[in-house]
Structure formats: C-alpha cells, structure tokens
Image: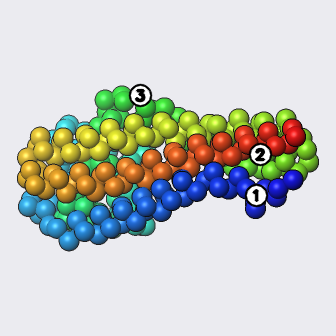
Amino acid sequence: MPFFWFDPTFVLLIPAVLLAAYAQFRVQATFRRYSEVRSSTGYTGAQIAAELLRRKGIANVTIEPIQGMLADNYDPRAKVLRLSPDVYQSDSLAAIGVAAHETGHALQDRDGYKPLALRAAIVPAATLGTNAAWILFIIGLFTHLTPLMDLGILFFLGYVVFSLVTLPVEFNASNRAVAVLQGEGLVLPQEAQGVRAVLNAAALTYVAAATMAILQLVRLLVLRESRRD
C-alpha cells in the first residue's frame, strides 16, 4: 500500500501544480508591469472605487485598507471593500484595475448576482468541510474505515463546488470592471488593455485553484478505490 503523503497518485496533481506556478508568476509579473504605468485620471485605487460606487449609486459600501499583497476583497455581508496598500494608495493601471474588479463584486451584490450570493453562503461550509475532509479521509485511509473516507470525499466535494462557483463570480466581476471603467470614461482605450491584462492574469489563479481542487478530488477517489484492492 502506498503512503498517503508519498504515493504515486501525486502525479495526478502535477498539471495543477504547474498551472498554479505559472498563474502566480504571470499575475505578479503583469501586476508589476502595470504598476509602473500611471493612470491618466490620477485616481488612486481607493479613489477609483469610491468614484465608481458614487456614480453607480451605491452608498452602503465602505472602503478600507488591508495589509497583504493582492489581499483585496469585497465582503458582501459586511458591505466592505478592502484594498491592499499597492492598490489603495497607487494611481497605476494595475491598482485601478484591481480596485474596479472589487467594485464589480459590489455591483454584483447590488444586482443580486446569484453566483455571488451562493459563494458567500457556502464559504463557511466549504472552509470547515475542507479541513474535516482531510482529517476524515486520512483517518479512514489508515484505519481501513471506508465510510470515513467516503465522508471525507463528500466534504471535499463541497470545496470543489465552491471553487467552481468562484469562477463565474470572478470572471463576471472582471468584465464588469472593464466595462464600467470604459463606460464612465475613467480609462482611455489603450489603458483598458492594460487593465484587462491585469485582470486576466488574476483570473488565471482562480482557474488554477479550481483545477487543483478537481484533481485533488480525483486523487482521493483513486486512493479510496485502491483500498478495495
């Protein structure tokens, strides 16, 4: 029997690991490149977000700084848009692109975009389920208790669903970001290309995460089946 942490099924994860590494490299390189390009408006990320919220009539969302590189996020429950220092204080194309993307989530929230609501609803379950999944599966694997392994797989399936639901949420927010920036005249046509490049690179990280989740699920199923031999 192969060991859980050092078994041949790890090869199943190689495509996801390579994709994740490439996505991380691309997002950092693209963000760094467009961090050197100043926006024609001179607005910082925080100012762009505030201006977009004002123009779209959203008055119940606050903007706060948050520590961490590219830790930007929108909390639909607290109605808070949090921007990292490199976004909050900068007037680069990279900064306004990320800020507009997070504002896109606020627009989704206002419009009742269902995938966003679904993702927000399953976040707690997905987080707890992922932790429980590995604990249950490992215990089941080493104690030969197949029902525990099955329960772990079921919990992990919840995380896979969360990862897949995240994809349309993020792609839609990016599309909204570019559209609203252009629609409000806050970027020039050539600037929109830079903004889109930053957001496309960021979107690849979510594709990599979903790919990893799916392949991890496949790996768990293969390990589970190997227990039947």
Residue 200's x, y, as percent? 31, 51
Q: Is residue 174 left or right of residue 180?
A: right
Task: Tell which circle, 1 or 3, labels the residue nearer the N-terminal end.
Answer: 1
Q: Amino acid at mark 2?
A: Leu
| Secondary structure at numbered mark 1 | loop
Quadrant location, the C terminus: top right
Q: Is residue 112 above or below residue 89?
A: above
Name the residue carrying label 2.
Answer: 223
Dot label at residue 7: 1
Instruction: Point out the frontmost of discs 3 and 2.
Output: 2
Residue sitting nearer the eye, 64 or 223: 223
- Determine whether, in the image, residue 175 is placed left or right of residue 183: right
Residue at x 43% of width, y 40% of height: 167
Where does the image place residue 139, in percent across and percent down from the top left?
Answer: 85, 49
* Residue denoted by label 3: 114
Q: Residues within 10 Å of mark 2 (few under 14, many from 20)?
A: many
Alpha carbon separation for disc pair 1 and 2: 9 Å
> At x 38% / y 43%, what residue is drawn?
170
Check disc 1: other Cα within 10 Å, few if <14, some if 14-19, many if 20+.
few
Q: Give whichever of 41, 171 is nearer the camera.
A: 171
Quarter location, residue 117 = top left
Foreground residue among 29 and 114: 29
Q: Which mark is residue 53?
A: none
